[in-house]
Each structure stands twice: as structure tokens, then as C-alpha cells.
Amino acid sequence: MDTTGKACVQVTGPGNCSTLGLCERKSTCYWPPPVDNREPYFSQAELDAATQWCGKVVPALIFVFFSLVIAGLTAVAWTQNQIMSDGVQGAFQAMDLTFANLNILSSTSETKHVNNF
């Protein structure tokens, strides 16, 4: 137990924390005492740029790429169906084929993954 009464891992050996009345944070290593004035890894400008990129650019790219994939698969499905009717019915058939293609692609990749092991 440490000085506050909490249960601690006790590691024996020179320089261990339990002889100082402190808790070991991990049973397999000694940790140096924390330093108050540590150097930051990144500058504020780098943090701001990363926050802006992750907050605005990444979601936009994901949306654009996902939309392009769906549009491409819909176009492929539209051309695959030879008896496509015009209008809304044709659009629904194209979407059905799109999702069927996605299902085939995902099941094929799963089969390849399983067969590789």
C-alpha cells in the first residue's frame, strides 16, 4: 500500500517506487518521476493544422469518395441490366444491382482472405 492507503504493485530492486512510498504504475518497469516543464511534441500551428485537416478535409474526402464509389457502381449496374425499364423502376433496379455487386465483391474478398490462410 502507498501512503494514501491504495493497493499498489510492489516491485523489488534498486530505485523502486515502493521504497519511496509511491505506487508502481507497471509491474515490469520503473518510471521516472514526472517533469513539470516538458517540451511539447508539436507546435500550436501544427496542432491547429491537424485539427482543421481532421475536422474538415477528412470528412469531405470520405463523403466524396464514398459518393463516387456508389455512383460508379450504380453506373456499372445500370449498364449490366439489358432489360432496364425507364424511370424510377430502372433506378431501383440499378441500385439493387449495385448492392448485389457490393455483396459479391465483399464475399469474394472474404473467400480469398479465408483461402489464403
Image: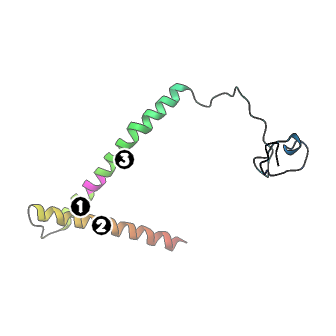
Q: Position of residue 77 (x, y in %)?
A: 22, 63
Magenta residues span 68-72
Q: Position of residue 53 (x, y in %)?
A: 43, 35
Q: Nearer the viewer, residue 100 or 82?
A: 100
Residue that numbered label 2 is attached to = 101
Give the amino acid type for the residue marked by disc 1 in the picture.
Val
Left or right: where 12 falls relative to 72:
right
* Sequence-first tag of 3 and 1: 3
Instruction: Tell me how far mark 3 sits from mark 2, CA to CA.
Output: 21 Å
Residue that numbered label 1 is attached to = 76
Q: Position of residue 21 (x, y in %)?
A: 85, 42
Depth check, mark 3 against mark 1: the one in front is 3
Give the amino acid type for the residue marked by disc 2 in the picture.
Asn
Q: Nearer the viewer, residue 76 or 17?
A: 17
Residue in the image at 33% along x and 48% along y: 65
Determine whether label 2 and label 1 are within 8 Å by CB: yes
Q: Is residue 79 visible?
A: no
Callout 2 secondary element: helix
Magenta stretch holds residue 69? yes
Left or right: where 107 falls relative to 117:
left
Magenta stretch holds residue 18? no
Assign the C terminus to one quadrant of the image: bottom right
Depth check, mark 3 against mark 2: the one in front is 3
Estimate how packed mark 1 is, as few (under 14), some (14 to 19) or many (20 or more) residues with alpha carbons within 10 Å: some
Left or right: where 93 falls relative to 4:
left
Residue in the image at 11% along x and 61% along y: 88
Residue that numbered label 3 is attached to = 62
The image quarter containing residue 22 is: top right
